[in-house]
């Protein structure tokens, strides 16, 4: 158990060291906000799909296909649990309540989860983690919009299924099903783009951390409950449920725990701004839970590594 904890702590430490680079780039004005936004677009629209496709370039095995089914069920279950837990949040200010409920449900499974899954499990982690990201997008652009906007009018069927996560899976799945790979002249650039995921994602997060204010989140009593649910209660329940059902693929279980234990999704702030919710609290909560995750993720993920080894 201690060995697993140390492995995860070391990998989380590596991610935070990369965040420190982004932090320094902000404070020294080396990167402007315009440049960082461009890096986010590159990461979401290009790097993430490349990473998923590269992870799916593997020989077909029935057990891996079954693992994808398990991963889908686990991801749906984790989000359902988040939705149930979010009803614990009660605020007089409904603009703030929407932000806190959204924060409870959705983790930073893409920016924070995928790099850690790749560091701990290699392509297997991304293989299963991609399913969690696709599920995240499905739930986020449907139920998540209802939470933030308060109605169904902004839900678009096209957005549910046409997003970087689902596109990566759709493009990558044939490579897995038919056990084929791209020719080297295309596969090598694909791998190089995939390798950008971890450093670019962490630098972006570190840059935004440097510009964040924790005060609004700390002044909001509901933030403490939301953070506890997001970082502790929900991932612990997911871990317990996976241990109870004993999935046949250990990597799938660990990848799901990594995604479920990630801090509040960065998308929380984007949605808060778009639908005129409490942006200050959303920024503070995303930043605060990201910093606290250096303490909460190692024991949870380390326990998963130990239980499912």
Image: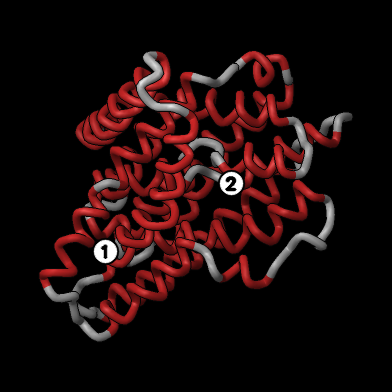
Q: Quadrant of residue 24?
A: top left
CA distance separating discs 2 and 1: 24 Å
Circle 2: element type:
loop
Circle 1: element type:
helix
Q: Quadrant of residue 252?
A: bottom left
When the figure is inspected, residue 207 is found, relative to residue 253, above or below; the finding is above
When the figure is inspected, residue 282 is found, relative to residue 160, above or below; the finding is above
Q: Residues within 10 Å of mark 1 (few under 14, many from 20)?
A: many
Q: Is residue 63 left or right of residue 284?
A: left
Q: Residue furthest left?
A: 184
Q: Residue furthest right?
A: 92
Task: Answer yes or no: is residue 292 visible.
Answer: no
Residue under circle 1?
A: 55
Q: Which quadrant of the figure contains the N terminus?
A: top left
When the figure is inspected, residue 245 is found, relative to residue 293, above or below; the finding is below
Q: Is residue 80 left or right of residue 114?
A: right
* Location of residue 53 in the rendering, given as x and y in whole percent from the top left corner: 30, 67
Residue name at image x 55 percent, y 37 percent: 264
Residue name at image x 68 percent, y 44 percent: 271
Nearer to me, 82 or 216: 216
Mark number displayed over residue 160: none
Residue name at image x 61 percent, y 28 percent: 283
Nearer to me, 257 or 287: 287
Residue name at image x 68 percent, y 26 percent: 281
Q: Residues within 10 Å of mark 2 (few under 14, many from 20)?
A: many
Task: Answer yes or no: is residue 10 visible.
Answer: yes
Mark number displayed over residue 106: 2
Sooner in the amino-acid sequence: mark 2 or mark 1: 1
């Amino acid at each position: 158990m201690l060995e697993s904890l140390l492995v995860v702590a070391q990998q989380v430490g590596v991610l935070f060291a990369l965040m420190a680079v982004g932090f320094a780039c902000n404070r020294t004005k080396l990167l402007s906000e315009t440049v960082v936004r461009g890096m986010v677009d590159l990461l979401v629209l290009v790097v993430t799909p490349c990473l998923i496709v590269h992870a799916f370039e593997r020989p077909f095995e029935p057990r891996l296909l079954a693992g994808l089914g398990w991963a889908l069920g686990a991801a749906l279950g984790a989000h359902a649990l988040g939705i149930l837990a979010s009803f614990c949040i009660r605020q007089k200010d409904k603009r703030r309540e929407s932000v806190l409920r959204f924060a409870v449900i959705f983790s930073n499974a893409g920016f924070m989860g995928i790099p850690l899954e790749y560091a701990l499990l290699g392509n297997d982690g991304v293989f299963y983690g991609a399913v969690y990201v696709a599920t995240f997008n499905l739930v986020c652009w449907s139920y998540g919009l209802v939470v933030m906007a308060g109605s169904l009018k902004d839900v678009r069927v096209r957005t549910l299924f046409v997003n970087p996560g689902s596109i990566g899976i759709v493009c990558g799945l044939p490579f897995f099903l038919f056990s084929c790979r791209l020719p080297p002249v295309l596969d090598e650039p694909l791998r190089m783009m995939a390798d950008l995921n971890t450093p670019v994602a962490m630098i972006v997060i570190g840059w935004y951390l440097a510009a964040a204010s924790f005060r609004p989140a700390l002044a909001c009593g509901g933030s403490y409950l939301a953070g506890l649910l997001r970082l502790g209660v929900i991932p612990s329940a997911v871990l317990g449920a996976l241990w109870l059902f004993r999935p046949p693929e250990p990597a799938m279980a660990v990848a799901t725990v990594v995604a479920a234990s990630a801090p509040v999704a960065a998308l929380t702030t984007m949605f808060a701004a778009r639908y005129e919710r409490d942006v200050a609290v959303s920024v503070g909560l995303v930043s605060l839970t990201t910093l606290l995750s250096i303490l909460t993720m190692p024991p949870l993920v380390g326990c998963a590594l130990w239980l499912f080894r």
